[in-house]
């Protein structure tokens, strides 16, 4: 195991002392050390349920024979950062996320990863890190964003907030419309119900496609007997699926 470099031998007495200080029992030291990279933050609506998911993932790792260590990864909500100077920080954060996952994993010689993610730059950043490190890893997203309803109509984050602002300014949306009455004072009431927790509506289709490819790959490896990890993790190279994720401007 990679983690043997920090927990075995006479020279690693100081390392073990620090590990014991984290609360790990001596009986658990022989387990694989699995990092849980969580991008949870209160400011991204797609992360609201992540605290619950962290606990379930921890239990899953331990049940599968590993020992979990949670570490935090920063995240930006593209929707909140949009339309002002904050948007200059969104794309660069993807590289920062990849670097942080790689740095923490390599510095602590973790044996595997679970990457808990949501939002446009966080998911590809974590996939890039997984491809770089090339150890067993699995990506977990918090699921699709559910939209609210107004007067019987299902709302869309894009059409009924971002695009609605432009439509109103151009006079395309009038007060008399039966579908939705949108005035500057009414935008907030629409915004309160248009997006209900979980992943960004923009990125879910891309996350779902990546997850499907990863799951199909794992099933194939399991049937052929080539999957060797007790965590049922998919190869990180297969997780990234194609070079456009790790090497170009996606998303």
Image (cartoon, rainbow, N blue to C red):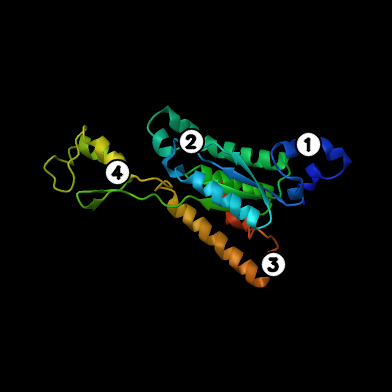
Q: Is residue 1 left or right of residue 214?
A: right
Q: Circle 2 is placed at which residue position? A: 90
Q: Nearer the viewer, residue 242 or 238?
A: 238
- Which circle marks residue 193 in the picture? 4
Residue sticking out furthest to the left: 176
Disc with the residue nearer the chain's start (3 vs 4) = 4
Disc with the residue nearer the chain's start (3 vs 1) = 1
Mark 1 lies on a secondary structure that is helix
Q: Is residue 2 left or right of residue 232?
A: right
Mark 4 lies on a secondary structure that is helix
Disc with the residue nearer the chain's start (3 vs 2) = 2
Q: Circle 1 is placed at which residue position? A: 17
Q: How packed is label 1: few (under 14 Cα within 10 Å), some, or many (20 or more)?
A: few
In whole angstroms, how far apart are the C-alphas of marks 3 and 1?
37 Å
Disc with the residue nearer the chain's start (1 vs 2) = 1
Q: Nearer the viewer, mark 4 or mark 1?
A: 1
Q: Nearer the viewer, mark 4 or mark 2?
A: 4
* Rendered view: 87 above or below 232: above
Q: Is residue 2 visible?
A: no
> Residue 189 at x, y = what percent?
25, 38
Mark 3 lies on a secondary structure that is loop
- Residue at 26% x, 40% y: name it: 190
Q: How packed is label 4: few (under 14 Cα within 10 Å), some, or many (20 or more)?
A: some
In whole angstroms, how far apart are the C-alphas of marks 3 and 4?
47 Å
In whole angstroms, how far apart are the C-alphas of marks 4 and 1?
50 Å
Disc with the residue nearer the chain's start (4 vs 1) = 1
Q: Nearer the viewer, mark 3 or mark 2?
A: 3
Q: Circle 3 is placed at which residue position? A: 226
Q: Nearer the viewer, mark 1 or mark 2?
A: 1
């Amino acid at each position: 195991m990679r983690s043997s470099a920090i927990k075995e031998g006479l020279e690693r007495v100081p390392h073990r002392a620090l590990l014991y200080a984290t609360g790990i029992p001596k009986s658990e030291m022989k387990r694989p050390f699995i990092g849980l990279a969580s991008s949870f933050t209160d400011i991204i609506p797609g992360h609201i349920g992540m605290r619950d998911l962290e606990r379930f993932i921890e239990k899953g790792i331990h049940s599968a024979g590993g020992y979990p260590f949670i570490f935090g990864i920063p995240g930006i909500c593209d929707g909140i950062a949009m339309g002002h100077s904050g948007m200059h920080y969104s794309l660069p954060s993807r590289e920062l996320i990849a670097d942080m996952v790689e740095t923490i994993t390599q510095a602590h010689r973790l044996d595997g990863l679970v990457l808990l993610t949501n939002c446009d730059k966080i998911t590809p950043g974590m996939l890039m890190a997984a491809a770089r490190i090339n150890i067993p890893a699995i990506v977990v997203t918090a699921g699709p964003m559910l939209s609210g309803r107004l007067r019987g109509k299902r709302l869309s984050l894009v059409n009924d907030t971002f695009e609605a602002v432009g439509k109103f300014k151009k006079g395309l949306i009038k007060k008399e419309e039966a579908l939705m009455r949108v005035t500057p004072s009414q935008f907030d009431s629409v915004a309160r119900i248009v997006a209900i927790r979980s992943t960004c509506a923009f990125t879910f289709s891309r996350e779902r496609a990546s997850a499907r490819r990863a799951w199909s790959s794992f099933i194939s490896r399991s049937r052929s007997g080539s999957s060797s990890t007790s965590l049922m993790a998919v190869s990180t190279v297969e997780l990234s699926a194609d070079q456009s994720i790790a090497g170009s401007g996606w998303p």
